[in-house]
Amino acid sequence: MTNTPRSRRLASRLLGSQEGIVFVLAATAFVVFALALPGFATPGNLVSLVRSVSVLGILALGMAIVVIGRGIDVAMIATMVVSVSWAFVIARTGYPLAEALVIGGAFALVAGILIGALIAYGDVPPIFATLAAGSIIYGLGRTFFFTLEMQNVPPGNDWFDFIGKSRVLGVPVTVIAFAVLCALAHFALTSTRFGWQTYAMGSNPNTARTTGVPMRAMVIAHYALSALVAYVAGLILASSASAINARLYNSTMIYDILLVIVLGGIGLNGGAGRIRNVVLGTIFVGILLNGMTILDVPFTIQNLVKGVVLLLAIVFDSLVNPRDEQTSQQGDL
Amino acid sequence: MTDVVEFRDATKAFRGNPAFRNVNLTLRKGEVLALVGENGAGKSTLTKVLAGLYRLTSGELRLEGAPVQFASPAEALRCGVAMVFQETNLIPSMTVAQNIFLGAENFFNRLRGVNIAAQQHLQSLNFPVEPTALVSSLGAAKKQMVEIARAVHHKARIFIFDEPTATLTPEEKQHFFALIGTLKKQDASIIFISHALEEALTIADRIAVLRDGQLIVADDAKNFTRERIVQAMVGRQLTAQLYGGETARRRVRKRGEKVLALENVTMGKAVRGATLSVYAGQITGMFGLVGAGRTEMMKIAAGVLKRDFWHGGRIKLRGEPVRFRVPRQAVERGVAYVTEDRKLDGLFESMRMAQNVFLGRLAMGANPVAYVTMAEARRQSERWLDALNVRAIDKNAKVIELSGGNQQKIVVAKSLIQNPSLIIFDEPTRGVDVGAIAEIHHMIQSLADAGAAVVVISSYLPEILSLSDRILVARQGRIVEEMTVDEATEEKIMYAAVH
């Protein structure tokens, strides 16, 4: 009897935030799958579960930084496929792969800076700027840089396989990369001037401007960072699959990134959320996808389930944490 | 004449702070009633209750003898009350005819039919407006006509105008007065809020003066003179207890170096050739009524707004010409602007107190990867939070959970931590409790004593008089009067500020 208040407090903490709700959902899904599916709770499957979503998680890290600063970057996938594909094309013309990768990275960086400049100086709403930039980048890439959809990793570069295919102490390098990038992003957001000013911009851009935050430089930095993160994610993806497929641009990947962000509890209004929300969202999506794959659920049904879960999380959140007029007014997409 | 509208013991309070209280006021059929008073006297709130935007906290509102409570402006309009706002409520991308019929459309609308009906309606009112013109292409006066036409079309009998002449040219004003005459002939009742006392004296049948939320006097216009109105607007006893005496026994600070000079600064229609100077070591008070451009002048000086590129005038900071494109440049040069609207651009509401204050400090540096911790933020902000006596139960409280007074102190602390040499306070005590007012005033005084150049913009005369060493009065985008606090009286300032 004595621990009733404590358990009640725990329950209200868990259900009192979207983060908690998603945590409960993820745990429930985990337990259900573990009990129902014999192969689910094995160490091998759990490692492959995390590995399968780490690219998504890395992309979500880049997106999280932009979204916390009250922006959105839907050009990430375009930047990712074009910069990596171009690097491979250059490498195949005779350059060493390492040099070609630097050029690819530089392309991603320039693309990010240009998008940021468009938003910072041109006052274009981020959703439109990045939507347009995404199709421009993809169009440019397919027209001038490469024609084949599928770009294989240039042969004779075994070291490149390391990041996507090998393991250190039994842990896939991909997962380690995700963990390291999470740690870096967490440090940047919580313990640097950059991070604090990012939260400030998301919390109230007008105040940030009046206070003297260098808004334009910050916006450009956000999009440059997310483009670089997209490039890194693309490299890992290409390494593990031995190729990069430009068609990813037309897939639902960008929505999956947003799914991870929103499910994890990073509000699209900006100024809220932490890296642990990205991790939580990534793992939840991973559990769902992995479980459904073992169950052999068709791809279209999987998408349907993702959509329903997202909707439920949002509806449940707004029932448990009703927003007043003022918070819902500011900065909806 | 019969009473159309009657306020009986009407009180409206926001979170316990009354905007007006115990007001007894009537509006008769076919009369023009002018409501005058200082900013914040409660005029707008009073009329907004009648227009259905707010509900009374206590007391009652009677419409033709029957008590009413409007749930929405639409309901008020159905009962015949229409409000014409300062910023018009029309939809700019639609035509005049569509706007007139807005909210009264049939299920199927024929554009031609609507245009013809609108044309007839406009002609019957004698308004020279083309029904097919887009509202966005019209001038201020014609927009007003459309709004009135819409109200008449909705069979309104009571019209409320909030500062109707503020945006009009003299010629348009004449047109507007003729229009009021037309409405009067049709037995409509009109309330209009104005800062232009001459207008009130010439076109109103009766004048009601509000001060600090109370109805001071309501009488026939012929019994008023300009002087009597001004006196009724400013004369106070209650507030004298809070601010009284300070002016008399205070020494006036000597002016130091000239820190800021605006020369002929122009920005659109809000600021039209403003010239002023601010000196170190003293407090410069700025008074003006709504639309005088005080805030805009100072926002230009702080880089929040940009003056016109061509013929925008000159700004000098310590004798050196400057043109700030963003506030950051001003902040780096030691200029801080403490906003009048802390919700809009003063606070990071979702962040903690220490974070808010420390972000002001962070904005000073350039290295983006500089290491920052919460402990550091607490340590650095503590000094300013203590100096301003911020009282919160929980040191980790988010700013949104604090009271208005504490929130304002956070905004002030966020600017002070930047160690500015020119600091501009825009309405520093708006929505702040009495205790916090005293503490913020004390801080402002000690900043000037320490040698900073301080500007205080306020719509509240006792505040201006008790704080400033030197007073500037703004009107229509210019500084029209400069005086020392010794020669200033409330009447003198108000006289300069009204048209």
Image: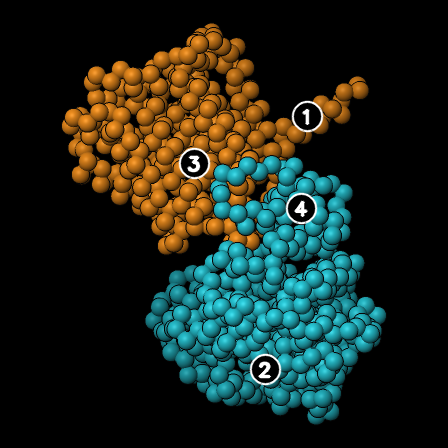
Residue at the (61%, 61%) spot, across then down: B421
Distance from disc 4 to disc 1, alpha carbons, whole Å, reads: 33 Å
Distance from disc 1 to disc 2, alpha carbons, whole Å, reads: 64 Å
Q: Colour of chain A?
A: orange
Quarter holding the C terminus of chain B is bottom right
Residue at the (52%, 56%) spot, across then down: B332
The disc labelled 4 sits on which kind of residue?
Answer: Ser
Q: Nearer the viewer, mark 1 or mark 2?
A: 2
Crowding at dot 4, Cα within 10 Å, few <14 / some 14-19 / many 20+, comes out as: many
The disc labelled 3 sits on which kind of residue?
Answer: Met
Q: Which mark is residue B141?
A: none
Identify which residue, B403 or A256, lies in the foreground. Answer: B403
The disc labelled 2 sits on which kind of residue?
Answer: Val
Q: Which mark is residue A10?
A: 1
Dot placed on the residue nearer the N-terminal end, 3 or 1: 1
Q: Nearer the viewer, mark 2 or mark 4?
A: 4
Chain that bears disc 3: A
Q: Colour of chain B?
A: cyan
Q: Is residue B146 visible?
A: no
Distance from disc 3 to disc 2, alpha carbons, whole Å, reads: 53 Å
Residue at the (34%, 71%) spot, across then down: B112
Write down the residue under mark 3.
A63
Numbered disc total: 4
Q: Is residue B321 visible?
A: yes
Q: Residue furthest bottom?
A: B222
Identify which residue, B113 or B400, lies in the foreground. Answer: B400
Up the image or down, B85 lies above or below A162; here it is: below
Chain that bears disc 1: A
